[in-house]
Every structure is written in C-alpha cells, then in structure tokens.
Amino acid sequence: MSSAATLIDVPLGGPTLPQERRLVTAIPGPRSQELLDRKAAAVAAGVGHTAPVHAVAAGGGVVVDADGNSLIDLGSGIAVTTIGNAHPKVVAAVQEQVAQFTHTCFMIAPYDSYVSVAEALNRITPGDHAKKSALFNSGAEAVENAVKIARKHTGKPAVVAFDHGYHGRTNLTMALTAKSMPYKHGFGPFASEVYRAPLSYPFRDGLSGPEAAEKAISVIDKQVGADNLAAVVIEPIQGEGGFIVPADGFLPAIVEWCRANEVVFIADEIQTGFARTGEMFASEVFGIVPDLITTAKGIAGGLPLAAVTGRAEIMDAAHAGGLGGTYGGNPIACAAALAAIDVFENDGMVKRAREIGAILQGRLGALQAADPRVGDVRGHGAMVAAEFVDPATGEPDAGLTAAVAKASIAQGVIVLTCGTYGNVIRFLPPLSIGDDLLHEGLDVVAAALAAA
C-alpha cells in the first residue's frame, strides 16, 4: 500500500491550515479505516490509539485526516506540540540542520547545538544556582538517568514515587508508575528499591498541603528511611494520574524535608514543562526549586528529545561515559529545541497559556456548576482537567468519561482521558489554537456530556 500522500492531496501543515472543524465523512472515514486495518495487521497489538483517524497534516489547533476531515486538537500529541504543529521556526531550523549533518553521536564528535540546548535549559529552569544538563531521547529515559545520577551522588539506593504518578514504560519507570493497566500489568518483575508515598489529592483526601506532606513524610520515614533514600520523584502536577494539583504547601514541605535529609528532589516536568501551566515550569507555580528536573514532550516542537537538568555538583556525580546514548541530543532534535525555546521565550507563550487556562477554567467551571457529574475541575494554564463522578456517591465514573471522549472524537474534537480511575478528561490544546476554535471544541464536549 502506498503512503498517505497518494490517498489524498495533503494540505500544508503548520498555521497555514484552515482553522476549522470540518467533517466530510463519519469518523473514521474509509481512508482512515483502511489505515487502521493495515495497522491491525502490521503493528503490535500493544500499540493502541485514541483517535481512529489517519493523520496527514496538522497545525494551529487542528489535525487533518486522510479523508479530509479537520479535527480540533485538544491534546497536542500529549502536550508535545505546545507551540503548534509544524511551527515555521522549527521547520526552518530542522531543514537547515538536516542539510548540514544528521548525526555524529555527541559522545564521538560533539557539536554546538547540543551545548546550546544545555545552556538554554540551565538558564531557564528554576533556580539561579550553577546547573548542568544531559540530553536523551524520551521522558522515560530522562527519568531513568535522573535516578542514576541521584543514586551516584548520594550513594544511596532507594527511590520514592507517589500515588497516581506516571513516569514511563521502561522497567524502572514502570516501577515508579502507580497505575497497573495498561502500563504495568503482566510486565513484571520491576526494578527494586522503589517505594510509594501518598500524594496530596485535595478533591479526594480533603487534607491541607502541610497535612498531606506530613502523612507522606511519615510513610517515607517508616517504610524507607532517609538514610537509604537517594531521591524523591514527583510530577508537580500529575499528568496521566489525572492532572492532580497538590494542595498549597505540599510540595514546599517535601522539598524542605529532602534538603534536610540529603535526598535529591526530582521534579518530573515532562508533561508540565515549557509554558504549559502558565509558567515556564510548573515548579514555579508552587515556588519550589528542584535539585534535578526532567523535561521532554514540548521541548522540541514534536521531535524526540529529553533532558535532565540540575545542580552542577549532582549532575557531575556520574563518571565519564556513565551518561549518554547513541541518539541522545540528536542534532536535528537540538535544532528544533533551540527554535522552540526561542518561541517559548519570545513569542508570548506563557501569556497565551494563561489566556487559554482562563477559557478552560471558565467553561469547565460552568459545566461543573450545572452538572453534578463533573466532580472537579483543576489545573493551571493550558493544562486543565475535569473529573467525572457518580453524583450520588462521588465515586469515579469511568464509563461516562469514556462515552464523552468517544462522542467528542466522533464529532471532530480530539480529547484525551487519564486518571488512575479512568474518569478524567484532560485538556492540553496547543498554545497556537484560536479562542473561537477552542470554544467550539468545548461546545462539542459539553454537548457530548449532555447526551451521555
């Protein structure tokens, strides 16, 4: 079977695409269904998909499929295309770099763009202390390396993660991840010396931040002990776990405890980083400065890149050759990252995230006030979620959540579900989306909820 380009005249991507929701067939259309049939025959069954479409172009706030349908994108490829798909600055940077060289391996023949990305990350991440960075390929790889670095620095083995946390699909990061299905079930045994502490979850635990922190620290002290603990790993706002925003005071108390006990505090900002939360990094929302911070997703405008950035004395703990990887800091991805960081810093992305957040909070808050099935609305910036519940019991309603998401996609709006209980819809629109398109997408979601 030939490529998508032969199935339909593919429009240009990026912001040149018409910014409209347009349905010319049912979802999936015949050409998308053809690809899904090929996928079923050729791709491992464990690789699932959310939207049953065959994407051929994307940009602004839309994804166009092979049948000519234009869907409103409220997922950004799971917070990756934050500045918009095929951003012109990223496209230009990639085109220039790919014509120069595509790979040397930084560990063999270093190049400027890797160093420039490290310098940029050292500058823009929280804290004014001396920092260093190392580049990798994926978020899970960044988390694994952050743990390696923390263990080498402290000489201690144990790592604590938190309830509802998600950190990846490799063996160590599956151990750190809290949710069994679909991420862990049947894939064990997992890496050892990984422990779990309770997270602040205001909607469900009713605790203040200091109370929740005291509970978590008590568990850590009793089950692990600071003398054995290399690192605490936490998402400042949880992603896959349900966009859980800890109560004020929780994170600062955990950081303070880590500082007092020579434990490395690792902020997993893979989903929350790069303007997503209305600050450049979510740690800034809570006034904390991590020892190490892991980034990926939005860092390079859609190209695979990840990083660990942190205190220079911690980052330098690993011996020469102990960090790296064949593709880590690939020059094309680095060129894209430098362009993306330029956009984040100079094109008003933080301000735009706050504007989008105000729209999301306003619209979803109105739904919550009118419909008791919307139990909670939470988030910061362009990272907002609605948690669906049985109004009689307050228990999670995964069935309703799935129905709303499925109906929204069928009407041309891509939304993503999440949460330990499968009862949360998360909204992660690209910051390039227009207000009118965002409102239209939310109209569709609201109609799907009303009809469910």
Image (cartoon, helix red, strand yellow):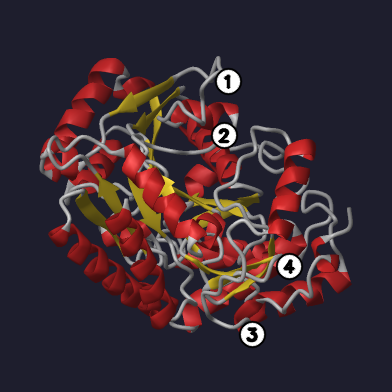
Local packing at callout 4 (Cα closer than 10 Å; few below 14, some 14-19, many 20+) is few
Along the line of sight, which residue is nearer the eye, 56 or 323?
56
Element under disc 1: loop
Residue 325 relative to residue 268: left or right: right
Element under disc 4: helix
Alpha carbon distance from label 1 to label 2: 10 Å
Mark before the other along the chain sequence, 4 or 3: 3
Residue 405 relative to residue 88: left or right: left
Alpha carbon distance from label 1 to label 4: 40 Å
Mark before the other along the chain sequence, 1 or 4: 4
Label 2: which residue? 169
Element under disc 2: loop
In which quadrant of the rendered view does residue 4 lie? bottom right
Image location (x, y in percent) of residue 68 = 67, 71
| For discs 4 and 2, the disc positioned in front in the rendered view | 2
Alpha carbon distance from label 4 to label 3: 31 Å
At x 29%, y 73%, the residue is 359
Alpha carbon distance from label 1 to label 3: 43 Å
Tag of residue 112: 4
Label 3: which residue? 16
Q: From what the image shows, is residue 108 above or below residue 174?
A: below
At x 77%, y 53%, the residue is 106
At x 28%, y 39%, the residue is 397
How many numbered marks have been drawn onto this rendered protein structure?
Answer: 4
Mark before the other along the chain sequence, 1 or 3: 3
Kind of residue indicated by mark 3: Thr
Kind of residue indicated by mark 1: Phe
